Image (cartoon, grey):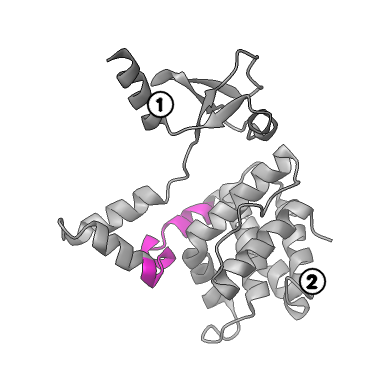
C-alpha cells in the first residue's frame, strides 16, 4: 500500500481534476508534521505544474492522442513532481510509491502500473536534467480557462501581453508563510526571525510546519505585510 501521505495527495488530486472539487481544509488532518509537510509539497507541485507534467508524459505514450485514466495521470504526476522538485525524496521511494498508487484499483489503474514504472524510471536517470526539461515547457500549459479569465480581469488596466506571463510566473512561486508568536514560551525548532522584519517569524529551510505549536494557541499564521502594518500603526 502507498503511504498515507501520498494517498491523501492522490485523493485530493482526484477531487480537483476528476470532480472539480476544491481541496478541503481537512485533507491532511491527522498526519504527522513531517508527513503533512511532504504531502503539502507534493500536492502543491502537482497543482502548480499539472499541465507541463502531462505534456511530458503525452508524447511518450503509445497513442499520444488518446487520454489515459485519471488514476494513471495522478500517479505519474506525483512521481514526476517528486523526481523533479523534491531532491530529498529518494528515487526508489518516488517511483515505487507511484507504482503502488497506479496498482490501487480505487486510486489508480492497475493495467498501467508497468507504464508508470517505465516512465518514472526514464525520468529518474538524470533528475536535474529532468527538472530543466520540465521547466522549459511554457508555463501557460498549467493555466486553466478560468485562470486565463482571472488574469485578464486583473490586468485589464494594463493589457500588454507579456504582463500575463509575468504575473502567472509570480503566482506560481510557493508561498512562504509568516508567523506571529502569541506567548512568551520558547519557539519550536525551525522558527526564526524574518531578516526583513525581525518581529515576524518564518520557517527555516526544510523545517517542519509548526502544527502543534499553532494548535496549542502559542502562535498564529499572519502575513508579513499585515504584521508590518500593525507595527506601523502601533508606533504611529
| Viewer-closest of 29 and 191 | 29
**Residue linked to disc 2:** 103
Mark 2 secondary-structure assignment: helix
Provide residue 225's location: percent of width, then percent of height: 36, 31
Q: Which mark is on residue 111?
A: none
Residue 126 position, x and y percent, is: 60, 53
Residue bearing mark 1: 227
Left or right, residue 163 beside residue 76: left
**In-image side of 181 versus 169 (left or right):** right
Q: Report which quarter residue 151 is drawn in.
A: bottom left
Q: Please tell me whether residue 191 belongs to the stretch shown in magenta.
A: no
Spatial CA distance of label 1 from label 2 is 47 Å
In this rendering, is residue 72 above or below 36? below
Residue drawn at x 41%, y 62% as measured from the top left = 137
**Looking at the image, is 34 positioned above or below residue 83?**
above
Question: At numbered mark 1, what does the secondary structure look like: helix, strand or loop?
Answer: helix
Whether 136 is among the magenta residues is yes
Amino acid at each position: 500500500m502507498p503511504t498515507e501521505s501520498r494517498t491523501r495527495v492522490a485523493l485530493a488530486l482526484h477531487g480537483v481534476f476528476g470532480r472539480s472539487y476544491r481541496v478541503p481544509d481537512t485533507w491532511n488532518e491527522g498526519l504527522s508534521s513531517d508527513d503533512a509537510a511532504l504531502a503539502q509539497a507534493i500536492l502543491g507541485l502537482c497543482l502548480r505544474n499539472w499541465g507541463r507534467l502531462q505534456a511530458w508524459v503525452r508524447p511518450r505514450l503509445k497513442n499520444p492522442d488518446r487520454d489515459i485514466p485519471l488514476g494513471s495521470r495522478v500517479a505519474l504526476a506525483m512521481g514526476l513532481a517528486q523526481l523533479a522538485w523534491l531532491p530529498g525524496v529518494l528515487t526508489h521511494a518516488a517511483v515505487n510509491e507511484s507504482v503502488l498508487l497506479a496498482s490501487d484499483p480505487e486510486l489508480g489503474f492497475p493495467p498501467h502500473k508497468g507504464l508508470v514504472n517505465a516512465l518514472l524510471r526514464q525520468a529518474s536517470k538524470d533528475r536535474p536534467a529532468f527538472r530543466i526539461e520540465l521547466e522549459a515547457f511554457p508555463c501557460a500549459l498549467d493555466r486553466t480557462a478560468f485562470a486565463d479569465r482571472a488574469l485578464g480581469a486583473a490586468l485589464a488596466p494594463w493589457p500588454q501581453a507579456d504582463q500575463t506571463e509575468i504575473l502567472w510566473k509570480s503566482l506560481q512561486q510557493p508561498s512562504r508563510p509568516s508567523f506571529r508568536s502569541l506567548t512568551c514560551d520558547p519557539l519550536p525548532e525551525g522558527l526564526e526571525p524574518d531578516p526583513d522584519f525581525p518581529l515576524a517569524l518564518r520557517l527555516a529551510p526544510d523545517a517542519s510546519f509548526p502544527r502543534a505549536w499553532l494548535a496549542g494557541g502559542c502562535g498564529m499564521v499572519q502575513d508579513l505585510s499585515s504584521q508590518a502594518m500593525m507595527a506601523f500603526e502601533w508606533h504611529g
